[in-house]
Image (spheres, rainbow, N blue to C red):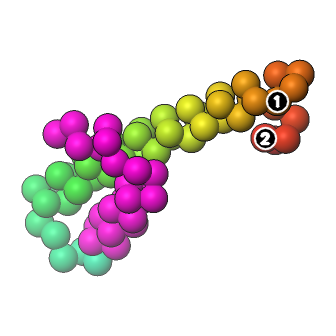
Amino acid sequence: MGEEKEQRFEEAMEELEGLISKLESGNLSIEESLTAYERGVKLTKHCKQILENAQQRVTQLMPDGSQEALN
């Protein structure tokens, strides 16, 4: 299921929000809930990686390499 590798941050967040809504509804079976949870974990990791990469790029663009503007 490597589709999250190509998924944009906004798309991943939208899918994650949908999964959260489904889980909160309580209308999923145990198996469906587990599948949704597993997908949510993968999407969360994917989004975190995108954000870390963006932070590294911004840090590289800073004249002195500081992260001052990121905090």
Judged left or right of residue 58, residue 48 is: left
Q: Is residue 17 visible?
A: yes
Residue 69 in magenta stretch: no
Say which quadrant the C terminus sits in.
top right
Whether 54 is drawn above or below 63: the answer is: below
Q: SS class of the residue under badge 1?
A: loop
- The residue located at (17%, 52%) in the rendering is 35
Q: Are marks 1 and 2 in contact (CB under 8 Å)?
A: no
Label 2: few (<14), some or many (≥20) within 10 Å? few
Say which quadrant the N terminus sits in.
top left
Looking at the image, the residue that sits furthest to the top is: 64
Q: Quadrant of residue 33?
A: bottom left
Q: Main secondary structure of the magenta part?
A: helix
User: What residue does disc 1 label?
Assistant: 62
Judged left or right of residue 33, residue 71 is: right
Q: Amino acid at mark 1?
A: Met
Q: Amino acid at mark 2?
A: Leu
CA–CA distance in space, label 1 to label 2: 10 Å
Q: Nearer the viewer, residue 56 or 30?
A: 56
- The residue located at (42%, 39%) in the rendering is 45
- The residue located at (32%, 38%) in the rendering is 5
Q: Quadrant of residue 14?
A: bottom left
User: What residue does disc 2 label?
Assistant: 70
Could you tell which of marks 1 and 2 lies nearer the N-terminus?
A: 1
Please give the range of residues in magenta.
Answer: 1-24
